[in-house]
Amino acid sequence: MLAEVIDLLACPQCYVDQQCSLELDLIDRALECARGHRFDIARQGYVSLISGGSTKFTGDSAEMIAARSRLLGSGHFDPLMEAVTAACARSGGVDPARIVEIGSGTGQYLEHVISGLPDSRGIALDVSKFAARRAAKVHDRIGSIVADVWQPLPIRDGVLSHVLCVFAPRNGEQSHRVLADEGVLVVLTPTDRHLRELIELLGMVRVDDKKVERLGSSMAGLFEREHSEGVEFTMHLTHDEVLDLVGMGPSARHLTAQQLEASVAELPELTPITASATISSYRKVNRGV
């Protein structure tokens, strides 16, 4: 599906040496720029566009991606997906929409957005090759790439209508660069009530209750907040779904399988779990004015 978004992508080496053409062409199962930098497309349909070929960050494992795919596929997080899609539709200033999801994971949030916006196209961007493999299959208008959000994004200047960050880090400067003048940054962040029933029991990573406030501060001079709203609901999860919920996030790296299974066994067979997040839309500020 990379052919659908090739006109939006840029050679990552171009931003390093400042001598190449920024454009990439699709040639014989690879992406290639005018100076001959070549990036082979994996047989699963994604391409790695990490400058220099490596990054210091470790992406989600195959097991984490599988757990996330199962849980998001169960429908429990559909209200969050619907809220993200509504935010993108409400804030659209560029039509048809051209969207990148940073830290896209399995690509299921982006798939929901693309399916809800006619003629839209999307780039699923994640540092994990396992995530990229999964995202490459979710929709025929989504191209999947491996990239590091803390390096210059391999996307051309001013070509996107939306940058989407769902429970993921965001790079304000790079988001500003790739968005068109009327572009919007849409961010979904957890509140301190998110998964609160499991935080103490399982020793999961806590959410900082100042996170949204800090997000607004980090966007100063780059974006102005247009809209913000909370989404909160209760999910009823089986033991297996609780295991997937913990296993798909950062807490999976801090708990052994034995610790997790022993703790989850003490829960009711259907456990009520709070999902709580804030979705915020930020309009790009033209710094030339």
Image (cartoon, helix red, strand yellow):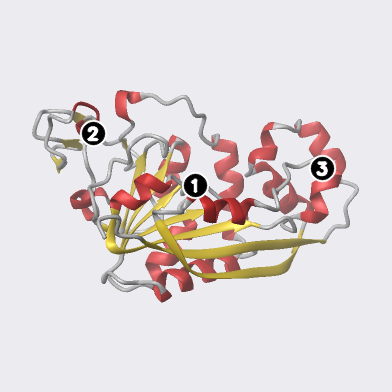
User: Is residue 90 visible from the viewing direction of this image?
Assistant: yes
Name the amino acid, label 3: Leu
Q: According to the image, label 2 marks what residue?
A: 15
The correct choice, above or below, for 136 with respect to 33 in the image is below
Name the amino acid, label 1: Gly
Q: Position of residue 128 (x, y in %)?
A: 46, 36
Residue found at the very far right of the displayed protein: 266
Q: Pointers 3 and 2 in contact (CB under 8 A)? A: no
* Label at residue 105: 1
The quadrant in which residue 183 appears is bottom left
Q: Pointers 1 and 3 in contact (CB under 8 A)? A: no
For the C terminus, the image quarter is bottom left
Q: According to the image, label 3 marks what residue?
A: 202
Q: CA distance from mark 3 to mark 2?
A: 43 Å
Q: Nearer the viewer, residue 267 or 254?
A: 254
Q: Position of residue 260 (x, y in %)?
A: 80, 38
User: Is residue 264 visible from the viewing direction of this image?
Assistant: no
